[in-house]
Amino acid sequence: TSSARRELVESLAVACRAATGADLALATGPLATESAADRPAEPFCFALAGPTGVTVRADPGGGPPAMARTRSAKMALNVVRLVLLEEN
């Protein structure tokens, strides 16, 4: 389910940040696969853990898997960019 995906990426981001001591940790998943092209789109979730908390977002997906992966990656990296801009 969507909430389970959100909880998973949130816990991964938090665990990654704690394990590495990084200022920020980005976790993503699951990504669309070519074999999933004939099934309904499932949301792609990503989480960014930082010193002020965790931001969790979801992309509803849709479209060809290759395009959905690219769009989702750009969305996740944009959240990192926005957080870094706020810090400066």
Image (cartoon, helix red, strand yellow):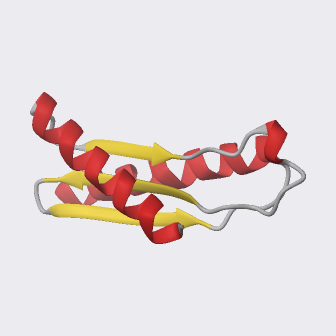
Q: Judge whether residue 88 can be spotted in this image.
A: no
Q: Is residue 75 visible?
A: yes
Query: Closest to the observer: 49 or 29?
Result: 29
Residue at the location (86% across, 48% down)? 37
**Location of residue 20 (image quadrant):** top left
Place of residue 3 in the rendered image (x, y in percent of width and height, measured from the top left): 44, 70
Residue 41 lies left or right of residue 24; in this view the side is right
The percent position of residue 6, horizontal first and vertical second, equals: 41, 63
Quarter holding residue 82: bottom left
Counting every numbered tag in the picture gives 0
Using the image as rendered, state which of residue 67 and residue 43 is in the foreground. 43
Q: Which residue is drawn at 23% across and 52% down?
A: 49
| Percent coordinates x, y for residue 70 in the rendering | 68, 43
Q: Which image quarter is the N terminus in?
A: bottom right
Quadrant in the picture for residue 17: top left
Horizontal side of 50 relative to 63 (left or right) equals left
Q: Describe residue 84's horizontal placement relative to residue 22 as left or right.
A: right
Q: What residue is at 78 percent from the left and 62 percent from the top?
A: 62
